[in-house]
Amino acid sequence: MRDFQVIDPSPVPLYVQVKDRLRERIYDGTYAPHAQLPPESEMGSIFGVSRITVRQALSDLQREGVIFKIPGKGTFVAKKKAAQELTRLEGFAEAMTRKGYDIYNRVIGHRNLPANNEVAQQLQVDTGTVVAEIRRVRHLNGEPVSLEITYLPQDLGQRLRNEDLSNRDIFLIFENDFGIALGHADLQIGAIVADQALAEALQVTEGSALLRIERLTYTAEGKPLDFEYLYFRSETFQYHLRIARRPTPTDAS
């Protein structure tokens, strides 16, 4: 920390300057993931600002997910969020394995049940039609990162009972084992707070912010194949999307 420059006279608020300097040192590797930051009083002396200013800078970094605090122990650097691109349709494990992450799925439920109105509408079946529901907690490098609730036709759900859902993506099973070609998916992305069940599954505090995704996947022939609710811990994962100012000729056709 001694290599930090003293805060410069500037119209930029002091806490913003402190926050930016800290973020720079975290992103350039000076502070590695899970490294402990100095106490607020020490950082105040280094930067020549009050503890209140330091505390405000740290609060902003914590909201951004750059750091986290453990009561009674101190402030630590958070791990960089894993990210999945939205430019192609692929399963979570498929995308994360390609980036070098270790993926494991814990199957916590696999049952048949009558489709409610939402599931029935998405899968284009009558309400009350029996469908399969599969619940899996996805682990990234040993930590729970998402809860995936998948609904699909009962016959496909039955076939999946014989597959290794702990280590394989359902998308790859569809294509490689069942010979089902995937077409496209429609996604809706939003945010919710964790209720008790979600908090327990993802090992977060009840009321924590979660990323919520609804995904409806179609076959290459345009038939609904599976409908999913995906709940991600917001401090561990993010989606990346590139959009163009104008559509390409293919998009416009």
Image (cartoon, rainbow, N blue to C red):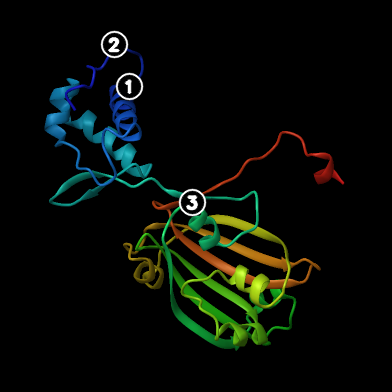
Q: Which residue is mark 3?
A: 99
Front residue of 135/214: it is 135
Q: Position of residue 165 (x, y in %)?
A: 51, 76
* Proximity of marks 1 and 3: CB atoms separated by less than 8 Å: no
Task: Check the image and report above or below for 141 versus 75.
Answer: below
Q: Residues within 10 Å of mark 3 (few under 14, many from 20)?
A: few
Q: Position of residue 132 (x, y in %)?
A: 60, 83
Q: Which dot, 1 or 3, sits closer to the camera?
A: 3
Tag 2's secondary structure? loop
Q: Position of residue 251 (x, y in %)?
A: 80, 45
Instruction: Say whether disc 2 or disc 3 marks the residue closer to the N-terminus.
Output: 2
Tag 1's secondary structure? loop
Q: What residue do we see at 29% from left, 39% from top?
A: 59
Q: What residue do we see at 52% from left, 54% from top?
A: 98
Task: Check the image and report above or below for 93 versus 28.
Answer: below
Q: Quadrant of residue 106?
A: bottom left
Q: Quadrant of residue 202?
A: bottom left
Q: Which residue is mark 1?
A: 13
Q: Quadrant of residue 35?
A: top left
Q: Which dot, 2 or 3, sits closer to the camera?
A: 3
Distance from Cα at disc 2 to Cα at disc 3: 42 Å
Distance from Cα at disc 1 to Cα at disc 3: 38 Å
Q: Which residue is mark 2?
A: 9
